[in-house]
Image (cartoon, rainbow, N blue to C red):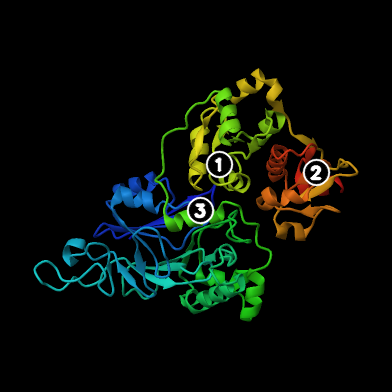
Amino acid sequence: MHFAQYYLDCLSQASYLIGDETTGRAVLVDPRRDIDDYLRDAEAAGLRIELIIETHFHADFLSGHLELARATGATIAFGEAAETGYPIRRLRDGERIFLGVDAAADGADGVATADGAGGGATGDGAAPAAPSGVTLTVLATPGHTPESICIVVHEQPDAPEPYGVLTGDTLFVGDVGRPDLLAATGLTPEEMAGRLHRSLHDKLLTLPDATRVFPAHGAGSACGRNLSTETTSTIGEQRRYNYALQPMPEAEFVRLVTAGQPATPGYFAHDAALNRDGHPLLDTAPPAALTLDAALAACRDAGAVLLDSRPLAAYTEAHFTGSLHTSLDTRFAEYAGSVVEPGTPIVLISDPGTESEARLRLARIGYDHVLGHVPDPAAELARRPDLVTRTHRLAAGEAPPGDAQLIDVRNPSEYAAGALPNAVNLPLATLPTSCATLDPDRPVVLYCRSGSRSVIAAALLEARGFRDVRDIVGGYEGAVSACG
């Protein structure tokens, strides 16, 4: 068996290539849009990607199922409850997929399954080949979303124990999928949490303890609140150590997993809809070079925003007035999707040589409307001091103005664990709308955990016309340390 995990740190996202080395048939689960790594590795291993499985409609990134289907001719598959704007194969609960059955032998027009889907008699009327080799079993596991599925992997169909299980967003290392991201029509987060509880206990926790767990996300993802930095585990380890899998009544589980979740970035609903309905294929061309005058004209005439992806220190020292900020050395795409409305034209202000990476990361969350980039920001900033400002920062322990509005832009669980006196919690992901509750004519002082999200928030408020915006260097940790 060929089994490979592809983990993308900047989105905390995992995808999986699974193949039978005898037949060369392979499945790709939860791909991202830039698919070259998958194609290269499959070719090197002598594998043909024939099926693309999505464990659910992802909200935190734009999936690459359409790109991969175009490149390989593979069939796209979802759980049976999925409704899409493009042709798919629906996988039923309990359905088995046999990668070890050769396509020529079973006459398949796809990967053979236990009930003969894609199989049948061979061209000469003979019976199809017996199931063998790498075998996948579909588990319907609604809860995170109605159409969520997990995939159990066996190296042979009669193997006594599974090799592992791909758990999508149903089970993470250290957490479970949140049931409140995209509540189904007519279903509350509490009802979805009840479904999640049953999926976990009736399906996943019936697997042997030695079964490896391969989730779709790790630490940093907004798809949960307690995800581990580990990207694999076992059912036994999760049964023992995962807070959400400890013995408790279903009602207590529901209360636990619906409380204290991270604020949802604004782009999540946009991406889920694109993953459901379809989207244009990835454009891999580098962003066009724009003069500063052309960039400013795009802002004025086309509603574009300047998005500065340079490191925090460079941005705070000097940036174009009104530009937004999120650095490539942080969770660039997620933060951009928190402060830039989907569909907004974007001009990149990036260090030379990083503009293509910035564009790709935006494309991974479906932000394709990048008009171009300003090639040498440092030179343009020096040339046009009339357009330049700097971020006003307070040293840790420095007293804010007496009439300042003190805003904590961390997630609710961080705020609940400890906050500065008189601070109001407006998480970064909600700030584009919640800033309407603030007085733009009074000073605003922002802080986060360590001083990164607060700079992003300060840029947003400055772009919205707030006159006096400052952030605390070192964030909450720095302020607490300075106070002894």
Q: Which residue is mark 3?
A: 271
Q: Is residue 408 above or below residue 151?
A: above
The x and y percentages for residue 234 are: 50, 67
**Disc number at residue 308?**
none
Front position among marks 3 and 2: 3
Image quadrant for the N terminus? bottom left
Residue at (15%, 74%) from the top-left corner?
Answer: 127
Residue type beneath disc 1: Thr
Q: Which sits earlier in the primary sequence, circle 3 or circle 2?
A: 3
**Residue situated furthest top in the rendering:** 383
Q: CA distance from mark 2 to mark 1?
A: 27 Å
**Frontmost residue, 438 versus 99:** 438
Note whether 315 is above or below 64 in the view shown: above
Identified at 63% across, 74% down, the residue is: 254
Farthest residue toward the left?
A: 124
Mark 3 neighbour class, 10 Å CA radius: few under 14, some 14 to 19, many 20 or more: many
Write down the quadrant of residue 382 in the picture: top right
Q: Residues within 10 Å of mark 2 (few under 14, many from 20)?
A: many
Q: Is residue 232 visible?
A: yes
Give the amino acid type for the residue marked by disc 2 in the picture: Val
Dot 2: element: strand
Q: Point out residue 359 in the picture as x, y percentages from the top left corner.
A: 50, 38
Give the side of residue 264 with respect to residue 281, left or right: right
Q: Amino acid at mark 3?
A: Asp
Q: Which residue is mark 1?
A: 344
Q: Earlier in the sequence, mark 1 or mark 3?
A: 3
Q: Earlier in the sequence, mark 2 or mark 1?
A: 1
Mark seen at residue 445: 2
Q: Would you say residue 409 is visible in this rendering?
A: no
Residue 313: % across, % down: 68, 33
The spot of residue 476 in percent (x, y) is 78, 49
